[in-house]
Amino acid sequence: MTESSARFEVEGVSISPDHYINGVRVASAVSFEDRSPLDWSRVLGHMARGNAETADAALSAADAAFPAWATLSCEARGEYLHRLAVLIDERVEEIARIECLDMAMLEESLKLRVIPRGARNFRAYADLAIAYQARTWSSNNTDNRVLRMPAGPAVIITPWNAPFMLSTWKCAPALAAGNTVILKPAEWSPLTASILADLIDEAGFPPGVFNIVQGIGEEIGAPLVADARARRVSFTGSPETGRLIAKAAAQNLSPFTAELGGKSPLIVFADADIDAAAKKAAGQYDDAGQVCLAGTRLLVESSVRDTFLDKFLAYTKAHVLGDSRSSDTTVSPLIHMDHLARVDAFVQRAKTNGDRVMIGGRIWREEGLWYEPTLIEPVSNESEIVQNEVFGPVLTLQTFDSEEEAITLANSTAYGLAGMCYTSDAARAERVGFAVRAGTVWVNCFLIRDLTAPFGGTGISGIGREGGDFALDFHSDLKTLQILQDSVT
């Protein structure tokens, strides 16, 4: 590995293809290709392809920088995070433009909602760390306090959907808690992580506190999580990869948290605002269904099925598939040619299984990565299309006749990330909200996030919780300090 000043330009934005380790850009001997989902023939850049040597260098830098960073006060660390937030605010449009090209999320949504959330994440965790109120109590003639101690280098592996926001969401609490960070972004959408490295440098973070490595998961992610110097591991991705990372982290007893996707139910009772429920259900095609929290299983009370379906189809018909940079577009392309093939294979197997494709079920046009919004009525709750995460614009429709049946269907998959319930009955909202097995349940709404609330899943949707003090506690070693009363002055 050698220091590098290489840059390339995308839509007027200068981007480094290299890793960011110990405060400098470091090249690799080999690279990987990054293409745009908006035009699969367009190569955006060739990114450094890290390996075990790269992982060792990043961990060494983070390990060396940890003692000094950990001894800073929360206020001092917060100053760095707040400076970084200001820099993100100043470059929202630029970051949104690149992320749109790189993973195809709607540019308008990125500008207005997603990228600004990155700055909010750093501010929120900086302030939460400062505001920490240690638990104090007296017992057995001692005064007791619970203290947070920084844990050490944290390895953070992020997914290809909403990569900038999710990177900041995971890195902010680690840094605020006093840990150093090695961030490994997904190879399908690596560009905005490289921009984040530039902003870290501009914010003046001490070398080694925040490192970013590029590459393929098996080649660089695996040695990162298997290293004993990684004292925290945080991952978002598939259950299959999550199991491998958990096994590697367990060898070193490194605490591990993971968000591993979902197959969330959207339950509609007859007493609900059917129009609002149908509109929200059609909105699950947002970002081409590449949203872990999406309510992909529509569970509708039998007596209102036809009314709901008519409204849902009308709202779905209004969707516009197109260029994610256009304000008219509501459904973007899928991230990668391989992922397009995976989504279509799910639908084709559903057809073979006898499941009824009510709308969609086709690639929108030959030369692109768009997939038509698809609704499938399964022959059985055991159908693969019901039980497994597709992560594309594919929903299923099932009916129920009682509240108990709705809950049974909602809890009938191995996943448990989120759920939605539409009802006008307050008592039912409480009952169903409590009974649905999921990390988050929204009633008559969706995707309203409070940064202080716990976030994560049950079952194969994940382990551990992020958000607020839950994330800061994860990134800390908790200590009980006991002092014998009247023994010190």
Image (cartoon, rainbow, N blue to C red):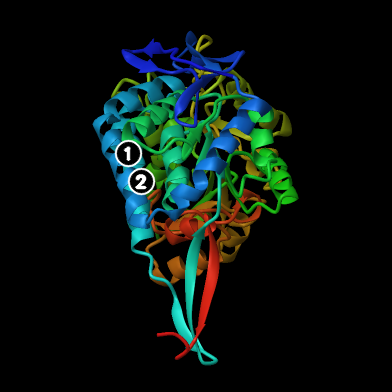
Decide which of 91, 288 is in the foreground and name it: 91
Relative vertical location of residue 364 with respect to residue 471 in this rendering, above or below: above
Q: Is residue 318 visible?
A: no
Q: Which mark is on residue 122?
A: 2
Relative vertical location of residue 33 with respect to residue 166 in this rendering, above or below: above
Quarter occupied by the N terminus: top right
Q: CA distance from mark 1 to mark 2?
A: 7 Å
Residue farthest front in this picture = 489
The kind of residue on which mark 2 rests is: Phe
Decide which of 99, 397 is in the foreground and name it: 99
Q: Is residue 448 visible?
A: yes
Q: Residue at x 43, y 18 (%)?
A: 16
**Tag in front: 1 or 2:** 1
Relative vertical location of residue 337 with respect to residue 399 in this rendering, above or below: above
Image position, residue 222 (x, y; %)? 68, 34
Per the image, label 2 sits on a secondary structure element best described as helix
Decide which of 118, 51 is in the foreground and name it: 51
Image position, residue 48 (x, y; %)? 55, 18
Q: Which residue is mark 1?
A: 84
The kind of residue on which mark 1 rests is: Leu
Given contact means CB atoms under 8 Å apart, are the residues at marks 1 and 2 in contact?
Answer: yes
Image position, residue 165 (x, y; %)? 41, 38
Query: Seen in the image, is 431 located left or right of residue 106?
Result: right
Image position, residue 349 (x, y; %)? 70, 29
Q: Residue at x 53, y 17 (%)?
A: 47
Q: Residue at x 34, y 27 (%)?
A: 96
